[in-house]
Image (cartoon, rainbow, N blue to C red):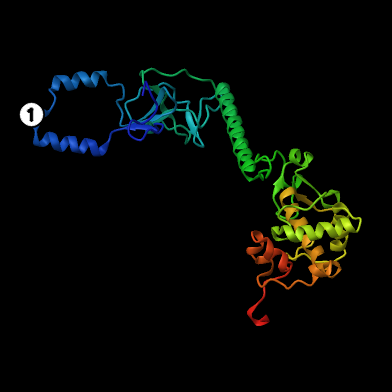
Amino acid sequence: MKRSVECPQCRKKVAEVKKNATLNNLIEKYLDKHPDMKRPQEEIEELEKTNKITVDVVEVTNKSSVQPTGANIPSLFSSSHFLDGGRVFNGGGFLGSNLATFAVANPQSLENGKLPLQPVVSYNLDNELSESYSGQEMEELDEAEEENAEEEKAEEEKAVVSALLPSCTSCLQKSAVSSNQTQKCASCDKFFCLLCVSKGAITRLQSKAPLTMNVGCLNKNIIEQQHLTRYIHGNGLTFTQVYENLLNDLVAKKINLRSGRTFKKEDEMCDLCFRQFWNELLYEYRTSINESLPREVSQRPKCWYGNECRTQLHNIEHAKKYNHICDKRNLSQT
């Protein structure tokens, strides 16, 4: 233990030093069967002289000191030292309940019902007595230990709170503020830190101004996208104007999204969710203007698979011939 405070078997910090009962029993049984393997008595006496731990159990208090528990320890204090509520008192003040000491009661010197103590000693591996502390010094040590305990508790609480804080979806960092001070998307409910919000990670729906449609709009059908673009430009409109009109109609409940969700103009939404939201609005808009489109477009037969059709993505002729802005047919509709 002079070199390390770790147990050679489990590698944890040593709490006490004592005999290994299992190993000792095995050695004793082995020596009983093989007496010739015993050490000579002279060698045993020499080893006993160099042995620094002469008690059955030694409690470790720090890296270099241990605390013996057992008898045969010389008396260091007078009978004025006694226990009071588990703490050591020396007439001038308490030495502290956490003092690394060992006391042996002397039943022959009871005074006024108090239990006097014979030895109060700290023992180290070098077999030397540690420095004695006065009552005031021990009180200061106790206060310092309490402060350290409070600091450790505060650090633990801080770590728990940090673990519970939401992570920013954009920068993946733990938010430096509580969840009620962060902002989250009205669609996916994911959190964003204030720094990413200030950079435009999420914005209000009324502040959005899309200039065109997304690539994934209208089932990714480029034919349907061309028909809608010609209609909007042909009526002297822009996609931003169409968005504002559709947002007003959604708030006024004149149109409904296919997802069934409702939003307000003040709601904030991330870019990923807004693209999906914009696609839903344009799909509803394309459905509402079908009769206003040219006859060769509006009178096309509906595809059996509707908006779930996969052929529309790679077969241009199929996409031109059939209308895919509709739901898939059921067998009952045949």
Residue 230, position in %: x, y?
83, 58
Type of residue at label 1?
A: Asp
Task: Give the residue drawn at x 79%, y 67%.
Answer: 297
Q: Secondary structure at mark 1?
A: helix
In the rendered image, is residue 247 in sight? Answer: no
185 and 21: which is toward the camera: 185
In the picture, the quarter occupied by the N terminus is top left
Task: Give the residue drawn at x 72%, y 64%.
Answer: 320
In the rendered image, is residue 16 in sight? Answer: yes
Residue 145, position in %: x, y?
56, 29
Q: Quadrant of residue 119?
A: top left
Q: Quadrant of residue 108?
A: top left
263 and 103: which is toward the camera: 263
Task: Give the residue drawn at x 91%, y 59%.
Answer: 235
132 and 145: which is toward the camera: 145
Image: 95 above or below 166: above
In the picture, the quarter occupied by the C terminus is bottom right
Image: 334 above or below 280: below
For mark 1, what is the residue? 36
289 and 20: which is toward the camera: 289
